[in-house]
Amino acid sequence: MRALFVVLSAMVLAACDPIYGVTRHAKVGFMPDPAKVRAIIEHVRGVDEVRYQQIVGSKPLTLGGIQRATEVYTFSYRGGSDVHGALQFEVDYQNRVEYRQTLLQMFQPPPQQWIDATLPVMQRIESRLETQAGLSGLRNSVMQRCDGVVCK
């Protein structure tokens, strides 16, 4: 029982760490080819470097039993000294796909010049994903959240 209390306390304390920055997200109809996504990002003005990582997440336990693990595709990108972004697709066991682009930091907001430089790059990436990767309607379905920063 004491171990459970320690674990729950740690989870509550970890959830209190402030996170600042910008998040753009949407539900999309499918997971585009990762090689195509990387190529699209690499050719967007303002991006100099792209790193790709695919990980397998947890296996959800449902009433139907243990399900297929969540797959997470992450594309971290940088450009110059001020562009810092991460794009993710998360595919769950029901093949639902969540799209997300972020520029986040814990404990303090990222510098405003990073936000100002990265937001237009995020929007250019979304425009190209819509036209070149077949994610029609992406730009109109993206929701944006800004915490502790000004998004113009």
Image (cartoon, helix red, strand yellow):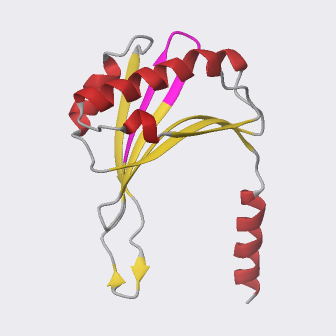
What range is drawn magenta here?
Answer: 73-85
Residue at x-position 70% and y-position 82%: 4
From the viewer's perspective, is 36 left or right of 117?
A: left
From the viewer's perspective, is 107 left or right of 53?
A: right
Q: Is residue 144 magenta?
A: no
Question: In which quarter of the view is residue 81 placed?
Answer: top right
From the viewer's perspective, is 60 left or right of 33?
A: right
**Place of residue 149 in the rendered image (x, y in percent of width and height, measured from the top left):** 73, 29
Question: In which quarter of the view is residue 62 placed?
Answer: bottom left
Q: Is residue 75 visible?
A: no
Residue at x-position 26% and y-position 24%: 39
**Place of residue 103 in the rendered image (x, y in percent of width and height, measured from the top left):** 58, 32
- Nearer-the-camera pick, 96 or 19: 96
Residue at x-position 70% and y-position 66%: 11
Number of callouts in the render? 0
Q: Quadrant of the N terminus?
A: bottom right
